[in-house]
Image (cartoon, grey):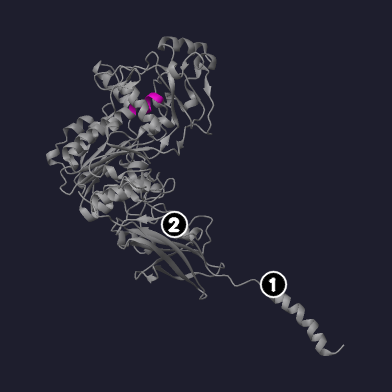
């Protein structure tokens, strides 16, 4: 057989060997806070995290390098594509992280940020691994808009009956005030509040 | 609780934080509380009044950031150390054990459930820098009552000293009326009635706190102090043991606690009616135990005791439980103190539980509550005489109600709960609400003013 044909025969197995080599991995972002369906499942709705205009909260991400000897060297947070110009705290999981977390995992945190503009905002993290590889992940949160209102409330009183469902209220009414021929003789104080809705 | 004051859901055991992957429960990503937002932007004060240990989740989930509701030392320290963030001015309830130096008998202070942020590692140093939070300290020997007093809080240890607090000269008030959870209304009232007769109060004496205030007495004092703040206040008042006694399926104890809670509601209502600028909501964090009002007893209390001796479902259920028209209308005689003269009436109200664990049922009032494992002396006499769990009492009647949940207590249920509202802005609590919606309605009312809903249209979520 001539040499060119042998070359052809040899070329085929080489190609099939090359195609079975796995694709190069990248750092994985396993958690993005505030939590969102966009990050968890890719769905933009429902928006999980909602805040008031200027209500403070923390951004955080958990980032896992693609192999044990690598680390995360940089993490940047963006909101609506704009980088937040504040230093990000980068913590290594060499200590202090949950047992199932790899020791070269990084936790990136940006504390006490807030947004004024109402609507749904995208939050993104862009990370750089020690070998130069980059990764990003996206989530969202909502700023609930103010409405034009009337009288402002000076004081708020939250009366919290722990574990108190409708049956507990009924039982207290029966015992405290009694019934005559099926009619409650007197309401509880909580019964005389103008509005009652399920929650 | 946390959903109402954060606008966001928290996982079980979390207060004011999102979950994370670190071990430290105090470093979690934070969410600013309603109290903190209104303190920061409007100068409002915060009051927390409860019948539970003040470290407990409901009061703490108004002011403290942690992923571990059990981390008591750090929680109570944060109440004081971050009071400038929350505006905390009134804190009342049980829980003295967290405030005593660890060497004092009964103290629960421990470095294992405390926190201290790093001065250099930005992961926690940024909490101090960017939230203006205190760094914390591992200080189990701290005298926290003394530190509260140094910070300008008057301190009350019982009803007598609470009554003696001169409101004119008081801007901040700490009240700690028990080592852990306060005794429930039924046992406090029993104590007061016995004292009036010149004999000991049994349960409150066994616990060592014979002079505990009722929730409406605590609420009255709290309002008198808080209303002095010209910028207004947020006050959370909790009837805490409705839940705790429902877990125990101790009908009379959660029922009388609900009556006690209603008397505190009346105090808040009268304040709001007079004030005209106060929004009051009454709600629950969840339902507990699946309470069902099944009917009334068809027998007298004396006959019920005879049937208990004969025992078994054929006696205690089939000859006792009257349903539909056989339930009648149970009549409880209310004493001068506003509580039933006795809960062991003839033809009593009968209650069963849909989220129950194993229990024996004889329908009669338990003379002692179940053991509370959070009490520091629960393993010493006399508290060792208290029954350990619902299957350890009423055994003589041999009427076992098999639990549908494993374990030794009834559980929380997922059913909707009612929310009642009064005052300006009450109308905005319309439609079936998500608990996080409540937060946005409260904030809207305080910051930009009340909004009347459009009753002609489907309700829009905030």
Q: Residue furthest front?
A: B456
Q: Which residues are magenta?
A: B251-257
Residue A35: give its label: 2
Judge left or right: residue A70 versus residue B288.
Answer: right
Question: Is residue B457 depicted above or below B290 in this figure?
Answer: below
Q: Picture coordinates of residue B153 (x, y %)?
A: 20, 43
Q: Which residue is mark 1?
A: A20
Q: Quadrant of the rendered structure where residue B105 is?
A: top left
Chain of the residue under label 2? A
Quarter that holds the N terminus of chain A:
bottom right
A137 or B148: nearer the viewer: A137
Look at the image and tell me whether residue B375 can be seen.
no
In percent of the image, x 40 and y 68: which residue is there? Answer: A77
Please tell me whether residue B81 is drawn above or below residue A125 in the rendered image: above
Across and down, in percent, residue B53 comes to 33, 37
Q: Can the viewer see residue A21? A: yes
């Amino acid at each position: 057989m001539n040499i060119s044909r042998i070359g052809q025969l040899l070329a085929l197995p080489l190609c099939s060997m090359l195609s079975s080599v796995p694709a190069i991995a990248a750092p994985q972002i396993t958690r993005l806070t505030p939590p969102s369906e966009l990050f968890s499942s890719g769905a933009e709705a429902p928006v999980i995290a909602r805040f008031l205009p200027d209500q403070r909260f923390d951004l955080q991400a958990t980032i896992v390098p693609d192999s044990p000897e690598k680390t995360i060297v940089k993490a940047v947070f963006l909101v609506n594509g704009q980088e937040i110009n504040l230093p990000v705290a980068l913590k290594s999981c060499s200590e202090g992280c949950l047992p199932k977390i790899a020791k070269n995992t990084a936790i990136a945190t940006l504390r006490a940020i807030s947004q004024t503009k109402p609507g749904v905002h995208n939050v993104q993290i862009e990370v750089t691994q020690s070998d130069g590889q980059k990764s990003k992940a996206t989530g969202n949160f909502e700023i609930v808009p103010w409405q034009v209102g009337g009288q402002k409330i000076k004081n708020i009183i939250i009366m919290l009956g722990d574990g108190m469902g409708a049956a507990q209220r009924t039982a207290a009414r029966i015992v405290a005030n009694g019934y005559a021929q099926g009619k409650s003789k007197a309401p509880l104080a909580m019964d005389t509040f103008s509005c009652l809705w399920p929650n | 609780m946390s959903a109402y004051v954060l606008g966001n859901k928290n996982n079980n055991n979390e207060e004011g934080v999102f979950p994370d992957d670190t071990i430290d429960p105090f470093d979690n990503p934070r969410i600013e509380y309603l109290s903190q937002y209104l303190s920061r932007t409007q100068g409002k004060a915060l009051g927390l009044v409860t019948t539970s240990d003040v470290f407990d989740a409901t009061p703490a989930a108004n002011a403290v950031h942690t992923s571990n509701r059990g981390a008591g030392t750090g929680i109570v320290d944060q109440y004081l150390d971050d009071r400038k963030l929350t505006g905390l001015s009134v804190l009342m309830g049980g829980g003295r054990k967290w405030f005593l130096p660890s060497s004092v008998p009964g103290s629960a202070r421990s470095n294992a459930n405390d926190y201290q942020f790093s001065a250099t590692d930005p992961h926690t140093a940024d909490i101090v820098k960017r939230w203006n939070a205190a760094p914390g300290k591992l200080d189990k020997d701290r005298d926290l009552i003394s530190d509260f007093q140094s910070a300008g809080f008057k301190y009350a240890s019982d009803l007598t000293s609470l009554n003696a607090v001169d409101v004119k000269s008081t801007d901040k008030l700490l009240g700690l009326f028990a080592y852990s959870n306060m005794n429930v209304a039924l046992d406090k009232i029993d104590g007061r009635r016995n004292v009036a007769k010149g004999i000991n109060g049994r349960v409150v004496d066994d616990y060592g706190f014979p002079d505990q205030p009722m929730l409406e007495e605590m609420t009255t004092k709290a309002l008198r102090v808080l209303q002095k703040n010209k910028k207004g206040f947020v006050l959370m008042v909790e009837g805490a043991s409705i839940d705790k006694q429902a877990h125990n399926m101790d009908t009379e104890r959660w029922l009388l606690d609900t009556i006690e809670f209603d008397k505190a509601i009346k105090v808040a209502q009268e304040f709001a009616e007079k004030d005209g600028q106060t929004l009051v909501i009454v709600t629950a964090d969840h339902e507990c135990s699946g309470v069902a009002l099944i009917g009334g007893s068809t027998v007298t209390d004396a006959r019920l005791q005879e049937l208990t001796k004969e025992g078994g479902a054929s006696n205690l259920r089939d000859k006792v439980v009257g349903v539909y028209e056989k339930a009648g209308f149970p009549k409880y005689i209310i004493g001068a103190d506003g509580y039933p003269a006795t809960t062991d009436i003839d033809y009593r109200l009968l209650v069963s539980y849909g989220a129950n664990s194993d229990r024996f049922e004889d329908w009669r009032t338990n003379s002692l509550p179940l053991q509370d494992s959070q009490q520091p002396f629960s393993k010493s006499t006399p508290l060792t005489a208290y029954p350990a769990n619902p299957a350890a009492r009423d055994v003589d009647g041999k009427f076992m109600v098999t639990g549908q949940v494993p374990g030794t207590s009834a559980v929380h249920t997922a059913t909707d709960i009612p929310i009642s509202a009064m005052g300006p802005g009450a109308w905005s609590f319309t439609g079936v609400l998500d608990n996080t919606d409540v937060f946005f309605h409260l904030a809207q009312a305080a910051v930009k003013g009340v909004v009347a809903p459009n009753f002609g249209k489907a309700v829009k979520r905030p």
